[in-house]
Image: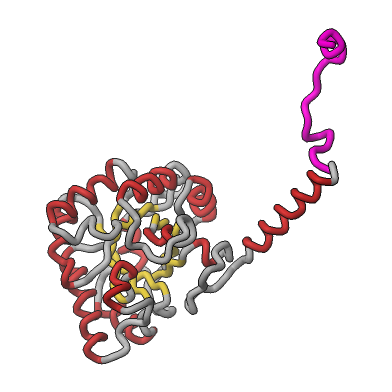
């Protein structure tokens, strides 16, 4: 049995130049598949708002919804590290509330760490959560909870001032005690520079190949979610088409009485059946 992947495993991976693999999962079955496949870490992301809940953004996902999905995923995991995404307004109001809510993710959600968005502005909050013995993964660049500020889902850090701000965000998260940082929708060369400037691992999503690891939304990379596919997604399968074909075949078999067949049915003693008439 492999060792459990931990925050120290993240740091060791960067030190040894071993790429870290992450995907999202929101339920038991998917988490179990990813765990058995050898993924390093799973994020129960508030991204579930789109493929699971059918929403346009992550902004109205609640902490109780997140904790439910975290618990479901946790049951399917043996060695993979589980990270829970803190939703909008569960950590921005003040540090005390952020620590309490992060604690709920550990106690009720059964995760190993939490993730939150923001850099310099969230450094004190990250520090408070870490002080409470709760590991924190940072997230900078395109932070979906700030979509209304950004005016949409846009690449971040292309201008000099914005690039400098992202570097400072990364350093602030490192100093605050974060064990890793997600870089989302950041130019590849800037992501490379940030990765070189911090001692903690960077996990890229739309940030190029020089990050210390990569993460994708599992519904995107498996071709399960069709409403929108970001530029940075590589589809490793087209399971939506496979599933639709399977459902059509099922419908056809039921209507033509080709299902269920003999091997799908149960039997009973004919003598007993005769006495029922």
Q: Toward which corner of the image does residue 152 lie, by quadrant?
A: bottom left
* In-image side of 19 versus 229 (left or right): left
Q: x, y (%) of residue 247?
A: 70, 53
Position of residue 136 relative to residue 199, above or below, is above
Residue 90 located within the stretch drawn in magenta: no
For the C terminus, give its image quadrant: top right
Q: Toward which corner of the image does residue 44 lie, by quadrant?
A: bottom left
Q: Name the residue: 35% across, 56% down.
A: 61
Main secondary-structure element of the magenta-colored stretch: loop
* Residue 86 appears in the picture as rendered: yes
Q: Name the residue: 30% across, 57% down.
A: 87
* Residue 23 appears in the picture as rendered: no
Q: How is the rendered protein coloured? A: secondary structure
Q: Nearer the viewer, residue 77 or 166?
A: 166
Position of residue 257 relative to residue 50, above or below, is above
Q: Name the residue: 37% across, 59% down.
A: 46
Q: x, y (%) of residue 253?
A: 81, 47
Q: Nearer the viewer, residue 257 or 163?
A: 257
Q: Name the residue: 32% across, 88% down.
A: 158
Q: Which residue in the rendered view is the most extreme toward the bottom?
A: 160
How many tags in the picture?
0
Q: Toward which corner of the image does residue 181 lie, by quadrant?
A: bottom left
Residue 263 located within the stretch drawn in magenta: yes
Q: x, y (%) of residue 52?
A: 48, 56
Position of residue 231 relative to residue 113, above or below, is below
Q: What residue range appears in magenta? A: 258-277
Q: x, y (%) of residue 105?
A: 29, 48
């Amino acid at each position: 049995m492999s060792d459990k992947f931990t925050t120290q495993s993240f740091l060791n991976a960067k030190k040894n130049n071993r790429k870290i693999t992450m995907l999202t999962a929101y339920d038991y079955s998917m988490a179990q598949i990813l765990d058995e496949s050898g993924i390093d870490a799973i994020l129960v992301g508030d991204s579930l708002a789109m493929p699971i809940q059918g929403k346009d953004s992550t902004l109205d996902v609640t902490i109780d919804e997140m904790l439910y999905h975290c618990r479901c995923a946790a049951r399917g995991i043996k060695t993979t590290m589980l990270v829970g995404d803190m939703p909008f307004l569960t950590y921005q109001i003040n540090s005390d509330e952020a620590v309490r809510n992060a604690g709920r993710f550990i106690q009720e959600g059964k995760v190993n760490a939490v993730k939150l968005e923001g850099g310099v502005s969230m450094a004190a909050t990250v520090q408070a959560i870490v002080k409470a013995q709760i590991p924190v993964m940072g997230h900078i660049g395109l932070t979906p909870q700030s979509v209304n500020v950004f005016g949409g889902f846009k690449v971040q850090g292309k201008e000099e001032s914005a690039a400098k701000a992202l570097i400072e965000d990364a350093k602030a998260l490192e100093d605050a005690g974060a064990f890793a940082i997600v870089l989302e929708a950041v130019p590849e060369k800037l992501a490379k520079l940030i990765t070189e400037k911090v001692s903690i691992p960077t996990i890229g999503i739309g940030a190029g190949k020089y990050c210390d690891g990569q993460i994708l939304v599992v519904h995107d990379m498996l071709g399960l979610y069709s409403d929108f596919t970001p530029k940075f997604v590589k589809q490793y399968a087209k399971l939506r088409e496979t599933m639709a074909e399977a459902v059509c075949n099922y419908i056809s078999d039921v209507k033509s009485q080709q299902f269920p067949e003999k091997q799908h049915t149960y039997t009973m003693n004919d003598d007993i059946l005769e006495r029922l008439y």
